[in-house]
Image (tube, rainbow, N blue to C red):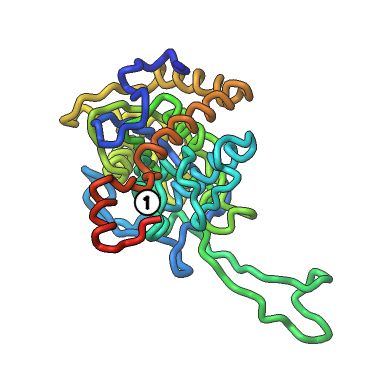
Amino acid sequence: MNLLKTVDAKFFHSEIPAKPMGKYAHFITLRITESYPLFQTDGELNKAKVRAGIENKEPISRLAMFKRKQSTPERLTGRELLRKYEIGDAKNCDYNVDFSKTTPDCILYGFAIGDSGSEKSKVVVDTAYSITPFEDSHLNFTLNAPFENGTMSRQGEVTSRINSQDHILPQVFFPSIVTLKDPTEAGFIYVFNNILRTRHYGAQTTRTGRVRNELIGVIFADGEIISNLLLTQKIYDVMKKKGEINPPDPLQEDEVLKAATEAITSLMKDEYISHTDFIGESLTLLLNEVKSITTNETQLQAMLMQANTESSTYAQTWVLKPAKKESKKDTKSNKKAGVVTE
């Protein structure tokens, strides 16, 4: 069943292949903070000291958004939809506890259950970095836990339930490339939909962590493309040259989007792979077509069911290996040796 008209069918497989077949779909994304998220390890915001740009060689510290901080919320979004429409084994699939091994989530994003089996992720996400420096992208907040009356004291005693925490500021931009290896058409839309729908990332996602994903391009290629860091550095160079980076003022979204489009277009010219780029007007047409599917409940369910059928078929063939039947030769050998086989 063909779902997309704006993308040539040659970029997709008719079924999920068992071996790498050299087809890649890259989603070029800008993750934009809209509240005060936390991307942290061991109580501190993740950061890395790197070169500011490709041309601007001075070192700066950047906020880092590790890969699991990106992929986990997105796969949970897909799992939620599968459960909502009662598709496949999603209801019986317990994330990080008891994977069903058959859903699009398990097959596309992978799983590992000790000795019970594993599946390598076909969705590749790497650490993303803020365009602006660490010192201009975060703020320390004092947190407290008041009593019932809303104050920090009761009967003359002041509570010690007070703490401070670094938070990432709103309007901080993290360029991120999400890669789907050997996509089917339904698998492509499934991952695409997860990126567009996911709204919260990082710790404490029930109260903060609002992040919006803006797509600036989709690139089909026969190999992997540039890194998140290189894209971030190129965007920094473009904006710095235009005088659009003026700390501590936040970056303007329209300027970042233009710079990101210019950066990815420029960088792809230096790649040594065959690629077809959906950027600008062609991306708009693709986004509109995907939106027409994901906002129509009937078409959305049809896409999810097709993705589940493909993943289930793959799982039955390559993941859930049936018990090896005992051959007649083995049976005779066992009888001679006195082995009971019933």
Please rate how many residues cluster around mark 1, counting C-alpha atoms within 10 Å: few if below 14, some from 14 to 19, many from 20: some
Viewer can see residue 198: no
Q: In this view, does 206 lie above or below 88?
A: below
Percent coordinates x, y for residue 19 in the rendering: 26, 36
Q: Measuring 24% from the left and 59% from the top, which residue is drawn there?
A: 336
Task: Inspect the image, locate mark 1, and give the three-letter code of the amino acid beneath it.
Answer: Ser
Q: In which quarter of the image is residue 164?
A: bottom right
**SS for callout 1:** strand
Q: Badge 1 is on which residue?
A: 118
Percent coordinates x, y for residue 135 in the rendering: 42, 59
160 sits left or right of 221 in the view: right
Q: Is residue 146 above or below residue 30?
A: below
154 sits left or right of 236 in the view: right
Using the image as rendered, state which of residue 254 and residue 130 is in the foreground. 130
Percent coordinates x, y for residue 312 in the rendering: 45, 36
252 sits left or right of 236 in the view: right
Furthest residue toward left: 272
56 sits left or right of 260 in the view: left
Q: Measuring 53% from the left and 39% from the top, which residue is drawn there?
A: 78
